[in-house]
Image (spheres, helix red, strand yellow):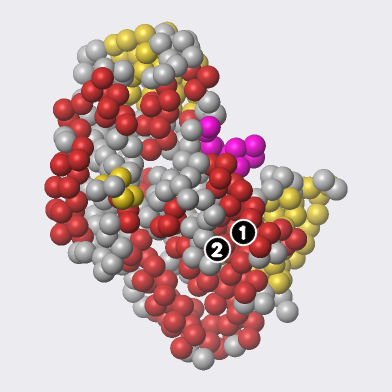
Amino acid sequence: MNAYAVIGAGPSGLAAARALQKQGILVDGYEAAHGVGGLWDISNPRSTMYESAHLISSRTTTEFAEFPMSSDADYPGHRVLRDYFQQYAEHFGLLELFRFETKVTRLEPQGEGWDLTAEGPDGAITRHYAGVVLANGTLAEPNVPAFPGEFSGEIMHTSAYKSADQLTGKRVLIIGAGNSGCDIAVDAVHHAASVDMSVRRGYYFVPRYIFGRPSDTLNQGRPLPARLKQALDSRVLKMFTGDPVRFGFPAPDYKIYESHPIVNTLILNHLGQGDLRIRADIERFDGSTVHFRDGSHADYDLILLATGYTLDYPFVDREHLQWRGASPRLFMNVFPPSFNGLYVMGMIEASGIGWQGRFEQAELVATYLAALENDPARAARFRTRVNDSPWPDLTGGYKYLGLDRMSYYVNKDAYRRAVRTERQGIEAAA
């Protein structure tokens, strides 16, 4: 039987290894860090985790269905989650499938498969595989924008932020207001001399609890049509959080769920208390002074870039993943249309999809690979259908913002439904 490689032992890599294991497919895993967990292991050199980080989706909507978390916390912290992945890997015998402290440096097509080169404790190794699953994560390569002028203080991306001690006594400007930026702003008000946030667009703020329950557990039945859900949830949010414009944020020029919402209302509390200020978009730097597009300016010691991440698969040439703009063009965000033996895991961003959604994605890959091994004609019919038929709509009716970070965004319900349909299609072709 052919062997397949899995790159990465974070949630998506573990899901891939488990799904392939269940199908009886031989797996070799590669992980650059010393253990499992990916970014959730704060001691991992590539981790972008910080001490105060917790889940922003609730435990029951996030965990793997076949292995519930032992924690009772609704929104566990990163240390609990790192232990959860260790327990998951131990329970299913995944640890022995991985080579740890072994970094993949190159993938090259060779014959009917791929040559994988990696650097590990014993030096460089090269192995041949029938296929490779890329699960090295989407939140590791910082997006660092350029700004006019020069700043004389410190500039740091949130990927390098670990603890609020780094902000003590400093005049801090946070650029960007995503979930990490807002988390860090809440940290900063207790340590920094002052905290400002520069934002260019408006946001929707979702409380973690509504009516005493985790907010993402309230609508777990049949999903509502996009327009109806947007209308209803917008009204509910106004009841619980009011209008963020009152606190200094610009009004959103898009509807809720057309970009990732902010699951943090503490920042609104601190704005209401005067603990931080919202600033306009950046115009230019001038020494310690930052000039904003509304004509105002202020002096800072530290600029913290909460500007997100870019996709990065540095070990394989882009042509093999058919990149288009900010992301590869892949069927179901997984399969290159050429079906060249590469499979991408975890290149989905969606509110509430959780690790179970990623495991279902892995099951689709495993189902196809099992067909490829045991019934090549069935696999061929799947490939033909992918290339001859329209691809499924994964938006769920939402008109996502045309931002780089939204280029691989999907609606969780539409995506999971499409994954089930595609998997059943492969199985039914037998």
The picture quadrant where one finds residue 284 is top left
Element assignment for label 2: loop
User: Residue 366: percent from the left, percent from the top?
Assistant: 57, 73
User: Residue 392: percent from the left, percent from the top?
Assistant: 34, 71
Up-down relation of residue 345 to residue 281 (above or below): below
Mark 1 nearby-residue class (10 Å; few <14, some 14–19, many ≥20): many
Can residue 198 be seen here?
Answer: yes
**Pick the front one: 134 or 412:** 412
Residue at 39% over, 67% down: 416
Residue at 64% over, 82% down: 373
Residue picked out by circle 2: 67
**Pick the front one: 324 or 228:** 228
Q: Are marks 1 and 2 in contact (CB under 8 Å)?
A: yes
Single out the residue that lies furthest toward the bottom. Answer: 430
Residue picked out by circle 1: 88
Can residue 409 be seen here?
Answer: no
Residue at 32% over, 53% down: 216
Q: What's the magenta region?
A: 40-51
Name the kind of residue labelled 2 in the image.
Answer: Phe
Look at the image and tell me in which quarter the N terminus lies. Answer: bottom right
Q: What type of secondary structure mainly makes up the magenta span?
A: loop
Q: Does residue 362 show up magenta in the picture? A: no
In this rendering, position of residue 199 left or right of residue 317: left
Mark 2 nearby-residue class (10 Å; few <14, some 14–19, many ≥20): some
Residue at 49% over, 65% down: 65
Element assignment for label 1: helix
**Pick the front one: 425 or 109:** 425
